[in-house]
C-alpha cells in the first residue's frame, strides 16, 4: 500500500520545495545528451525541468501513483516519458544520471536500494538524491505519537510512519562501500516562512500524512487530522508568519 497523493495539495508549496532541488542540481556535472531517470517523479514538473536544464537525450519519470502521473502526462516534451512502476522494481540500466527528489525516504532497505541505483548507472554516471529528514520536529513527532494511540494504533499496528532516512554518516559510508568514486553528503536545514502555523499543517497533510490517509480510510483519517491539527497548533503557538524549519538529506555521488 502506498500513500494517498494529491498533486494539487502537494504543489501548493512548490516554491519552498524547489530550493533543495536547486541545491541538488548545482552538484550535477552536466554532459551532452544525458540519459536521465527521475525516480518518484510525482507531478512531473521536475522531470521536464531535467530535460530542459541539461538538454538531456532522454528522461524517464518513474512513479507508482496513478494520481500523480495523471498530472505528469499533461507535460509535453518529446524527450520525456513516464512509467507507472515501483522504484524498487522498475528496471534501471545504462543511465548517466539518476535523480530522486523527495521520494526515497518512502522506500525501505536503503543499502540494497542504493546498490540497485548504482547498478543502473554507467561508469562515471551520477546519483543525485534529496530526502526530507525532519523526523525529529513537532510536525512529524506529533503524527508518530498519535499513530500509537487509540483508535489509530488498532489499524496501523506497530507502524508509526512509512518513511525513514539514515544518518549522514551512514550514507557517506554506504556510497563509499558501493564503490562511488566521489561523493557529497549534506544535511542542510531550510527555513520556510509560512503565513501561519496552520500552513504547516497543510504542508504536512500533502506529504507525511498521505501515508496515514492511505491506511486509515476517510473517516478515521479525518479524525487523525483533527487531533493532529489541534495538538500541533498547541505546540507551535500562534506565530504569524510561522518559521518552518526543515532538515533535508542531500546526496550526490559519481561512479
Ligand atoms: C513528495 S513526492 C515528490 C515528487 C517529485 N519528485 C518532486 O520533487 O516534486 C514523492 C513521490 O514519490 C512517489 N513514490 C513514493 N514511493 C514510491 C515507490 N516505491 N515507487 C514509485 N514511486 C514512489 C510518490 O508516489 C510521490 O509521487
Image: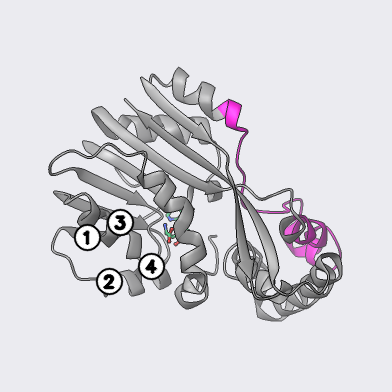
Left of 88 or right of it: where is 138?
Answer: right
According to the picture, the residue beneath numbered tag 1 turns out to be 81
Gap between marks 2 and 4 measured at Cα: 8 Å
The Cα atoms of the two marked residues, 3 and 2, are separated by 10 Å
The reply to whether dot 2 and dot 1 touch (C-beta < 8 Å) is: no
Coloured how?
A: one colour
C-beta proximity under 8 Å, tags 3 and 2: no
Instruction: Work out whether residue 83 or residue 242 is closer to the camera in this orientation and state it.
Output: 242
What residue is shown with label 4?
A: 43
Q: Residue at x 30, y 58 (%)?
A: 47
Q: In the image, is residue 166 part of the stretch drawn in magenta?
A: yes
Identify the residue at image location x=77%, y=78%: 226
Q: Quadrant of ligand 1?
A: bottom left
Q: Residues within 10 Å of mark 4 (few under 14, many from 20)?
A: many
- Determine which residue is flagged by label 3: 61
Quadrant of the rendered image containing residue 203: bottom right
Above or below: residue 158 compared with residue 205: above
Name the secondary structure under disc 2.
Answer: loop
> For numbered disc 1, what is the local secondary structure?
strand
Q: Is mark 4 within 8 Å of ligand 1?
A: yes
Left or right of residue 53, residue 11 in this image: right
Instruction: Specify the quadrant that holds the N terminus.
Output: bottom right
On the image, numbered disc 2 is attached to which residue? 73
Residues in magenta? Answer: 141-170
Give the image quarter of residue 89.
top left
Q: How far across and down, in percent of the image, does residue 96 sit? A: 23, 37
Amino acid at each position: 500500500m502506498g500513500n494517498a497523493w494529491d498533486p494539487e495539495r502537494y504543489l501548493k508549496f512548490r516554491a519552498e520545495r524547489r530550493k533543495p532541488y536547486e541545491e541538488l542540481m548545482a552538484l550535477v556535472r552536466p554532459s551532452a545528451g544525458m540519459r536521465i531517470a527521475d525516480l518518484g517523479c510525482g507531478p512531473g514538473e521536475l522531470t521536464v525541468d531535467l530535460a530542459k536544464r541539461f538538454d538531456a537525450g532522454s528522461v524517464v519519470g518513474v512513479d507508482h501513483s496513478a494520481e500523480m502521473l495523471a498530472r505528469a502526462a499533461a507535460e509535453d516534451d518529446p524527450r520525456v516519458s513516464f512509467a507507472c512502476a515501483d522504484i524498487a522494481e522498475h528496471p534501471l540500466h545504462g543511465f548517466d544520471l539518476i535523480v530522486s527528489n523527495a521520494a526515497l525516504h518512502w522506500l525501505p532497505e536503503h543499502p540494497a536500494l542504493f546498490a540497485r541505483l548504482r547498478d543502473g548507472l554507467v561508469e562515471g554516471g551520477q546519483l543525485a538524491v534529496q530526502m526530507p529528514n525532519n523526523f525529529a520536529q513537532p510536525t512529524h513527532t506529533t503524527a508518530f505519537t498519535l499513530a500509537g494511540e487509540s483508535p489509530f494504533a488498532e489499524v496501523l499496528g506497530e507502524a508509526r510512519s512509512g518513511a525513514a532516512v539514515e544518518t549522514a554518516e551512514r550514507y557517506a559510508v554506504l556510497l563509499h562501500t558501493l564503490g562511488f568514486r566521489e561523493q557529497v553528503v549534506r544535511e542542510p536545514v531550510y527555513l520556510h516562512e509560512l503565513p501561519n502555523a496552520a500552513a504547516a499543517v497543510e504542508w504536512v497533510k500533502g506529504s507525511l500524512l498521505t501515508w496515514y490517509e492511505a491506511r486509515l480510510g476517510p473517516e478515521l483519517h479525518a479524525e487523525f487530522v483533527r487531533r493532529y491539527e489541534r495538538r500541533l497548533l498547541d505546540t507551535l503557538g500562534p506565530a504569524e508568519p510561522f518559521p518552518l524549519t526543515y532538515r533535508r538529506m542531500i546526496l550526490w555521488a559519481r561512479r
